[in-house]
Image (cartoon, rainbow, N blue to C red):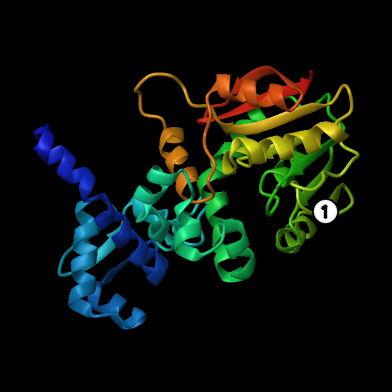
């Protein structure tokens, strides 16, 4: 039915988690890695994954109906272009994102009502601590988190590098830069740049091998610490991608004021986030905004909200540079 009635459309929305959990099981079992470019029967896959053959077949058949697999012949399946994205060895793999979203994130989202009623992150209620504290105590999930962030935000990096001119910057600090997935390609694309990666000690330990493998240890300092306490000096531009959206206004002001203290008078602040547009058109940032409420307790913001937030921290928003993705570069200088 090409145009189902309203009740049927709503029913499809309500069943959305059925599909996401089926994709999760596929990712957790590594089924896409077992099929890759060929085809395999449900029986073959069940034997390799120690699962129940008929139940696995039913899972594959359902996912074939929504475009993840194609069933050919007698219970034999191959990957579609969409299904290929669940392989571990492809660029922009979504396997880690599927696992993270449908494990701890799914559990937190089951408490969305709590977040809406209280304004507090449901993750803290479910797991007993904030998400980044929890990740620091669960290294296996932290590794999945790193890979998931690369998969969901990876395409933004090329768009960011294409949209912004770094010629006037000598040293770029990536505050909360994670595993280096933004700073490494930025340094590679701009040979004149020196870099500083600043993040928690447990994150820096995960990032160090990436900079070594990229041959950038001579051009980049890796510094551990908390941006709630201080920011390292020495850069003429400070960048944060998907950091500000993790926190409430009070927490953001602490981070921004710490940057303001060390930023040179002619330096610049670069905040890379989704800027919520007006109107009712679909925009992924509106979905991400709820995820920020549920998981870390932050939010996505409008241009006006960023302007107000920056002003309270002593910055003047100078321009918003759009990219070919939903990411924008929000540039600010000292007021």
Residue at figure coordinates x 57%, y 26% from the top left:
323
* Foreground of the two, 45 or 109: 109
Please provide percent x and percent y for residue 87.
Answer: 44, 60
Q: Please tell me in which quadrant of the rendered image residue 33 appears.
A: bottom left
Residue identified by numbered label 1: 222
Q: Nearer the viewer, residue 301 or 257?
A: 257
**Residue placed most toward the observer, 68 or 261:** 261
Up the image or down, 69 lies above or below 280; here it is below
Q: Is residue 74 left or right of residue 163?
A: left
Q: Which residue is at a point 32% across and 55% down the rendered structure image?
A: 20
In the structure shown, which secondary structural element does the residue marked by tag 1 occupy?
Answer: strand
Left/right of residue 174 with respect to residue 60 in the rendered view: right
Residue 192 in sight in this render: no
Residue occupying the point 38% across, 50% down: 114
Which quadrant does the N terminus fall into?
Answer: top left
Of 179 and 229, the residue lying toward us: 229
Q: How many numbered tags mark residues here?
A: 1
Q: Residue 304 placed where, x, y %?
A: 57, 19
Q: Where is residue 257 in the image (x, y as percent from the top left)?
A: 77, 34
Residue 215's quadrant in the figure? Answer: bottom right
Which quadrant of the figure has residue 167?
Answer: top right
Q: How crowded is mark 1: few (under 14 residues within 10 Å), some or many (20 or more)?
A: many
Q: Is residue 235 above or below residue 220?
A: above
Quadrant of the rendering where the C terminus is positioned: top right
Q: Is residue 292 left or right of residue 75?
A: right
């Amino acid at each position: 039915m090409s145009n189902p009635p309203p009740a049927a459309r709503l029913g499809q929305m309500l069943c959305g988690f059925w599909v996401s959990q089926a994709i999760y099981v596929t990712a957790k079992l590594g089924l896409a890695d077992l099929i890759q470019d060929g085809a395999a029967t449900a029986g073959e896959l069940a034997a390799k994954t120690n699962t129940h053959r008929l139940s696995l077949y039913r899972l594959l058949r359902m996912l074939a109906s929504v475009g993840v697999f194609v069933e050919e012949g007698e219970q034999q399946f191959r990957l579609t272009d969409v299904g290929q994205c669940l392989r571990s060895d492809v660029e922009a793999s979504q396997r880690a994102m599927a696992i993270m979203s449908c494990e701890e994130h799914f559990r937190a989202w089951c408490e969305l009502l709590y977040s809406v009623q209280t304004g507090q992150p449901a993750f803290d209620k479910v797991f007993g601590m904030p998400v980044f504290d929890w990740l620091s105590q669960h290294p296996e999930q932290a590794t999945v988190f790193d890979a998931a962030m690369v998969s969901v935000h990876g395409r933004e990096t090329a768009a960011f590098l294409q949209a912004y001119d770094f010629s006037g910057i000598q040293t770029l600090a990536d505050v909360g830069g994670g595993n280096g997935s933004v700073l490494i390609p930025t340094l590679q694309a701009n040979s004149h740049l020196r870099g500083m990666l600043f993040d928690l000690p447990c994150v820096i330990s995960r990032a160090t091998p990436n900079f070594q493998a990229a041959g950038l240890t001579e051009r980049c300092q890796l510094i551990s610490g908390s941006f709630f306490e201080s920011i390292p000096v020495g850069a003429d531009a400070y960048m944060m991608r998907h950091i500000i959206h993790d926190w409430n206004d009070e927490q953001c002001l602490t981070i921004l004021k710490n940057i303001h203290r060390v930023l040179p008078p002619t330096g610049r602040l670069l905040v890379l986030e989704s800027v919520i547009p007006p109107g009712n058109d679909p925009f992924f940032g509106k979905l991400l905004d709820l995820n920020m409420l549920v998981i870390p307790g932050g939010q996505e913001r409008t241009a006006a909200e960023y302007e107000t937030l920056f002003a309270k921290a002593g910055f003047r928003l100078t321009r918003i540079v759009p990219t070919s993705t939903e990411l924008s570069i929000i540039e600010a200088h000292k007021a």
